[in-house]
Image (tube, rainbow, N blue to C red):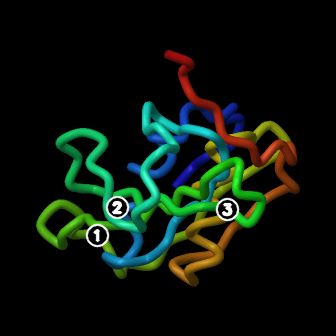
Amino acid sequence: LDLRSNPGGLLEAAVQLAAQFAPPGSTLVTAQGRGIMGIDAVNDEDAPIKIDDSTLFETRARKSNSGTTREFDFVAAASDEIAPWRGLPLAVLIDSNTASAAELVAASIQDLDLGIVVGQPSFGKGLVQDVAT
């Protein structure tokens, strides 16, 4: 998976990509904020939240320790039919221009022991971006 010179992008795209390699039920990313991807942080239930008709991942929200924000877990949900390459050997290529959401994809793959990350140290941003509505 070549992420060299990939400046990243939106959180949803990163999660959709990482979910295609991770086993269902694996937490890909945890983000904290008042609301993410149009999800309002008012709901107190730790239950799946449907974002769209995506079958790649689901989102769970819970109160953070501060009580003023919420934590959002993005959990892989792709079936083997959608991601038949799951389990194949995987190397993720990164360089100093790999940033943001691309770093999250590489980190998810590495943290879940789904493959190896090869190349130069990345840009180091490691933040998520969302479209304000």
Q: Is residue 129 left or right of residue 20?
A: right
Q: Could you say which disc has been placed on residue 85 in the image?
A: 1
- Establish if 124 lies above or below 77: above
Residue 64 badge? 3
Do the CB atoms of the residues marked 3 and 1 lie less than 8 Å apart? no
- Mark 2 is surrounded, within 10 Å at the Cα level, by few (under 14), some (14 to 19) or many (20 or more) other residues, namely many
Residue drawn at point x = 52 percent, y = 44 percent:
41
Where is mark 2, residue-wise? 20
Q: Position of residue 8 (x, y in %)?
A: 64, 35
- Asked which quadrant contains residue 46, the reply is bottom left
Q: Secondary structure at mark 2?
A: loop
Q: Earlier in the sequence, mark 2 or mark 1?
A: 2
Q: Is residue 22 or residue 120 the one in the foreground? A: 22
The alpha-carbon separation of the residues under discs 2 and 1 comes to 8 Å
Q: Are marks 2 and 1 in contact (CB under 8 Å)?
A: yes
Amino acid identity at mark 1? Trp
Which mark sits nearer the N-terminus, 3 or 2? Answer: 2
Residue under the image location 59 percent in, 66 percent down: 108
In the current view of this chain or complex, which residue is farthest to the top? 133
Label 3 is placed on what type of residue?
Answer: Ser
**Mark 3: secondary structure:** loop
Q: What is the total number of numbered labels drawn onto the structure image?
A: 3
Q: Residue at x 36, y 81 (%)?
A: 87
Q: Is residue 80 left or right of residue 27?
A: left
Q: At which x and y percent is residue 119? A: 78, 59
Q: Is residue 116 left or right of residue 83?
A: right
Q: Identity of the amino acid at label 2?
A: Gln
